[in-house]
Amino acid sequence: MSVERSPESIEKPVDLRGLRALIAVSDSGSFRAAAAQLGYTQSAISHQIAELERAVGAALFTRPGGRGHVLLTPAGEAAYVHARRVLSELDALDASVHATQRGERTVVRVGVFQTAAAELLPTALRALRDEWPGVEVILTDTPEGPGLADWLADGRLDLALTINQRPDDRIELIRLFEDPWVVLTHRDSQLATAERPSFELLDGTDVVAWTSRWPVQQELEAAWRRRGITPKVVYRTDDNLALQRLVAAGLGHACIGRLAARRAVDSALTWLAPDDILIPRTVAICHPRRRHLAQAARSLSWALREHFGR
């Protein structure tokens, strides 16, 4: 009888070739395709996987035989995640060392929206600096619509943080979390005392809004119209801080994302979270599909997913 061991009990060193073989077999679905991809014979790939399975004490693949695709076992799925991370970190180490030897400075260009720059990036950038101490990160306002895919595809951006980004064949979307719309208001306003928070409370009230050139604001106002909500937009701005200050001054209410509302800049502000979802508001990372992503950019993406993905 064989006994599976926990990762803590692994005593035999794990060969990196086995980790690369694990990833290649899983991604391609067969030992034959993995062998062609890595430049080994099929028997060599089988041997590397067998050695890895002996090292971890668990079967990593189910092998249906014939032309059926091999599939990861639950243990294999866990090993796959760690193998990806280990190899990514090793590649990052190698790239960082060689860049230092060549006297190069690594630059990562990131497209952001204002709340992402203020609330998401600082945590992820601290993690990035530990791994890439000499990296230079350039933050740029994320272009709207198809312009974002253009910037990622031609190298003006390495990755981007977006809200409700529309699919495009040139980019890969990695969902982080939902950041639903909430109502931002002054603590002394009538809305703040409402027993049942709802977006309908905005009907007929003064509202501070984003400029209508932003697709997310256009979507928000279309959602108001569909529900018969007709607020009076008295101020428009592109600046998150200005919007919050105007609301704090009692000049109107606003709809903003929950992430920004939680970190409101003025103690005079409060926010209401209706039970219903007005429209989805999805925060995602965007990668270029057909362009190599530098290791430092990959590391930043991993840091964002590790800290904020849910």
Image (tube, rainbow, N blue to C red):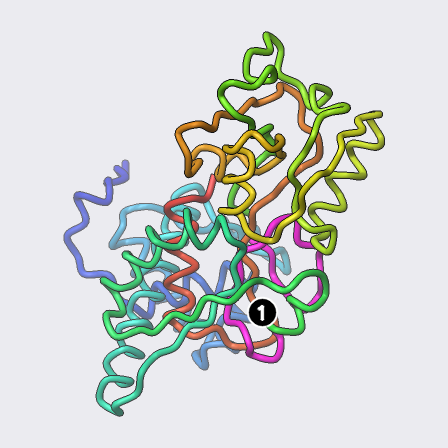
Amino acid on which the number 1 mark rests in the picture: Pro
Question: Which of the image's four quarters has the N terminus?
Answer: top left
Nearest the viewer among 94 and 142 is: 142
Residue 99 horizontal side relative to residue 275, left or right: left
Give the number of callouts.
1
* Residue in the image at 62% along x and 75% along y: 153
Q: Is residue 155 above or below residue 139?
A: below
Residue 64: percent from left, percent from top: 57, 50
* Residue in the image at 19% along x and 49% along y: 10
* Residue in the image at 23% along x and 70% along y: 133
Residue 160 lies in magenta, yes or no? yes
Residue 158: percent from left, percent from top: 50, 71
Could you say which quadrant of the image residue 89 lies in?
A: bottom left
Could you say which quadrant of the image residue 232 lies in?
A: top right
Which residue lies under the disc numbered 1?
Answer: 288
Q: Is residue 148 above or below residue 206?
A: below
Residue 177 lies in magenta, yes or no? no
For the magenta stretch, what is the residue range?
153-174
Residue 186: percent from left, percent from top: 52, 25
Q: Is residue 79 above or below residue 275?
A: below
